Amino acid sequence: MKENRYDVFDDEIWQRIANDAGLQAGKKAKLSLTSAAMAILLTLSFLTAVVCLRSHHRLAATHAASEESAEAVSASDTAYDALIAEADPEKVFAADEHFSHKSFTLYPDGKSTGKAVSLDGLMPEDASAQAVDVIRNYADPDDVRTDDKAAFSQPEASVIAAYNITITDGGEEYEPAEDRPIRVEITDPQISTEGITELWHIKDDGERELIVDYMIREGKLSFYAAGFSVYAIVAAPDPYVKPALDPVTSLDDLTGGRAGAGFYLYYIDAKNNNKYFTGTVNTNGALIEAAATDNAAVWFLEQEAGNYRMYTLVGGQKVYIHNLSDNKIELSQTAYDGITITGAPTENTFYFKKADESKWLQHSGSGEGIRYLGDNNNTINSQLRLLFADNATPPDDCYGFGGKSYGLMHYTSGTVGNALMAGEDNNHLEMLSMVVRADTQRNTLFVAEDSDISLWTFHLVSDSMYKLSTVVNGVTRYLKVGERLTLTDEA
């Protein structure tokens, strides 16, 4: 049984999908990927998705294979009784009179380089093998077209080893059958277990296939092959990790060069949780608070006569903090308050006082958010902090998911996972339970190759925001978050 590979992603909140796919009312699903280290968080509303299937996406490319020959140092013939395929240890293939079990160890650049390609499996009786080092065709960015580079997962990926492998029999190239793969082990000093390694099969017609089932250890990578030409080992760039935001430590920071990108404002509550200012006012005349910067607003300060005007952007328009009445605030495009900012006793904290009145911006328990109060006696609520927002926005498609298709699965441990499936009627979705095999060392799940998994295509909206679509009965449908997860015809 051949297997497909899944990349495992940590989840926080998936239970309500598994129970009833019930979500709080919201907009069409736009997934925000807010952190990644091999574990990528997919957020839709308050939902966190967990597992992505790496599709065998193929992109056209060209390559110029070298005609250099490589020395075949050793070849051994033995009677072939059985070949145990790694993907299915119960499957045994009987040899016939034209085939035998053969092993080759090839040194493309000579033994002294520490590079070798080993082949082991069922081959024609008179087979010979050759491996040519073609790294120079891919190592120099100037020698690789832009769209050629894009055939790998990310343009920044670098090819660390590439070999053109050929098996011949009587002058003709031999390609093993799918049910009789040959084990390949590539030894190269550049292969490392650190970081992310990808294996690509570059076929003679330029088509590229991402090989997902392989084993890697320091200096060696092994896999089963049912076709030969160029195999490229790629060191992919580390996943994007949202950088830590720097705190504002002095009043001078409020007008320095970094201030132009704005700030995240927050206080630390009695339970030591950060509570951030949003750009939404509740019915109590207070700014709603958020638990993370992902859901917070970026605030800007405009100097005026020694004070500041505070604004954020809503729909691309400036809206200022303005005292509506009593302690209530509003966000106004025309009216604004002058605010005096001074240092507070606790390190890296500040008081925000209305310039012409004894009112301080702070958390209000009765207001259930941020608004004015007539004193600053509550040191927890009134001492505010700021973070520079200049490095908070990730680059567009920072995870390289745009345009690619993945499966989504809930998996925590054990041998069973639950895949998010698109139903064929009434735009409904369901969770399909299936047996998986986990490789925790590589953050990988394996399922049967013929598993019926819905593939979800990621459509980039901006930086780390995506819409998801799938194909149902030949029609593209989009994932929508409402009272429940459903599918819709509109993006």
Image (tube, rainbow, N blue to C red):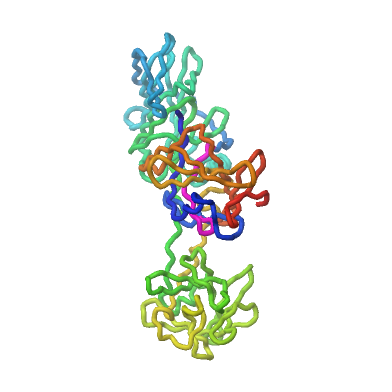
Percent coordinates x, y for residue 131 in the rendering? 43, 25
Which image quarter: residue 221?
A: top left
Which image quarter: residue 62?
A: top right
Percent coordinates x, y for residue 433 in the rendering? 48, 41
**265 horizontally vs 279: left or right:** left
Above or below, 445 against 488 in this view is: above
Instruction: Point out the image quarter for the N terminus.
Output: top left
The residue lying at 44 percent from left, 80 percent from top is 251
Percent coordinates x, y for residue 335 in the rendering? 63, 82
Residue placed most toward the observer, 343 or 438: 438
Percent coordinates x, y for residue 449 in the rendering? 49, 32
What range is drawn magenta here?
Answer: 43-56
Above or below, 465 against 377 in this view is: above
Residue placed most toward the observer, 3 or 183: 3
The residue lying at 42 percent from left, 36 percent from top is 161
Number of marks: 0
**382 horizontally vs 452: left or right:** left
